[in-house]
Image (spheres, coloured by chain):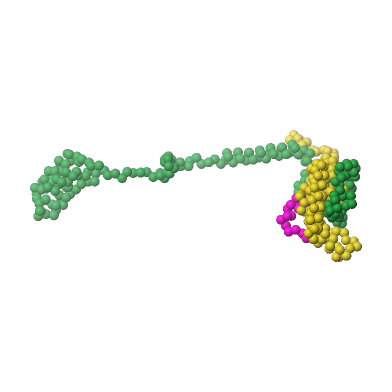
Amino acid sequence: MRDSGQGSADPACGEFQMKHPTQNEFGNGADAGTSEAEQTLRLIAHLPAPEGLEDRVQAGLRSRQMDAAPGARILAWPALRPASGWMRTAAAAAIVFVVAGGGWGVYTHVQPQQSAKVIVMPPRVVSPGGFSNASAMHVPNTLNGPTIPNPAATSAAQPKVVAMDAKGGARPGAKPGAKKAVRRAHAVKPGNQATPQAAAQAPK
Amino acid sequence: MSASQAVFAGWMEIPNSAVSDEARTQAEHTRAEEATLAALVSQYAGTLYRVAFSVLRNAADAEDAVQEAFMRVLRHRDTLDEVRDQRVWLIRIVWNIVLDRKRRAKTRPETDDVSELARVLPSTGLSAEEIASAAEHHAHVLACVEKLPANERRVLMLSAFEELSSVEIAAVLGITESSVRSRLFRARNLMAGLLNHARSLR
């Protein structure tokens, strides 16, 4: 109920307390308006609570308490509760021991294969632009330089040609076999190419 | 029995008296809390319901709010002894709950206040026409109350509860008593203006 001691002891407070419409401090218009509003609000504030509200609230609280009861467990070990401190520590230590031991056992029994072939890859040279050549090697596409034939070999081959000329192999109207022999004599091996000068001398 | 077995048996041995004492104390404590909570429910459920209904204006929502308020009390039942004024504390809890619900309910379609008021307001000795007329009038007044600024509206609504003094209203709203008085003064002035304006338009 209303705390009348607090409400009436303070005169300043009483000035603004809810009053009967006839006691309102405002003018007639304000009086009527305020009284209407306060009457409505008071009417609502005094509505009775629905029947059985307390029972429903109590039942709801009871069901919530049942749900949140600390003893409602699937496995309840009440006998171990007072010693739960050291039991918990011992259980944690045992779990750590088992896990560490198992890990050590696995480590000692299963060693990685060391005989695997090791392929040594050439070091990758990363270009400054960030692109790589994918290990492709560049081979310059250059021609072989001119090679001077061995003067001793040249001098040894020259009389032979001359001799063949003497037989008339190079002459027009000579036998086809003689022509072949001349061509064979002037044939140039890939590693021993004839110089332009020698090529120019050859048909003579 | 080996030495290790004996040590283990010693560890496992728990005195029955300690267990029973603790269980008994726990049970007594729980019983005392339940009794306190039951007393709070039977004493203040009606008040909390009316406070909730004055804001929500829906019977089911108000009952839900009361239930939720006591659920919160149950959650904080360990601190019940530290509460100085349990009535104000409970009203403050339910007040915060209903304001929160009201804020969330703004997105939902509003209920028909007139029909709800006609259903819940006392109508003894009135004809159906008078009941409808009174309900419409109260709905109009409440619509004007809704137009008030939030601070003034809350003070005006709480001041309609005769069991709440200005000190207690200040405690519920978390403001000073002088603020309650000034807000109530402003609320009454604004309310009078709103209702006079509405009357002049008719």
Image quarter where the C terminus of chain B lies is: bottom right
Total labels drawn: 0
**Looking at the magenta stretch, what is its main secondary structure?**
helix
Residue B14, position as x, y percentages in the image: 80, 38
Q: Residue, x 8% and y 47% (percent of image)?
A: A166
Rendering quarter of residue B197: bottom right
For the residue pair A32 and B143, the one nearer the viewer reads as A32
Query: Against A86, is B155 above or below?
Result: below
- Read off the magenta span: B98-113
Query: Against B182, is B56 above or below?
Result: below
Q: Is residue A195 left or right of residue B149?
A: left
Residue B88, position as x, y percentages in the image: 83, 45
Residue A85, position as x, y percentages in the image: 75, 37
Q: Which hue is chain A drawn in? A: green
On whether residue B163 falls in the magenta region, the answer is no
For the residue pair B99 and A202, the one nearer the viewer reads as B99
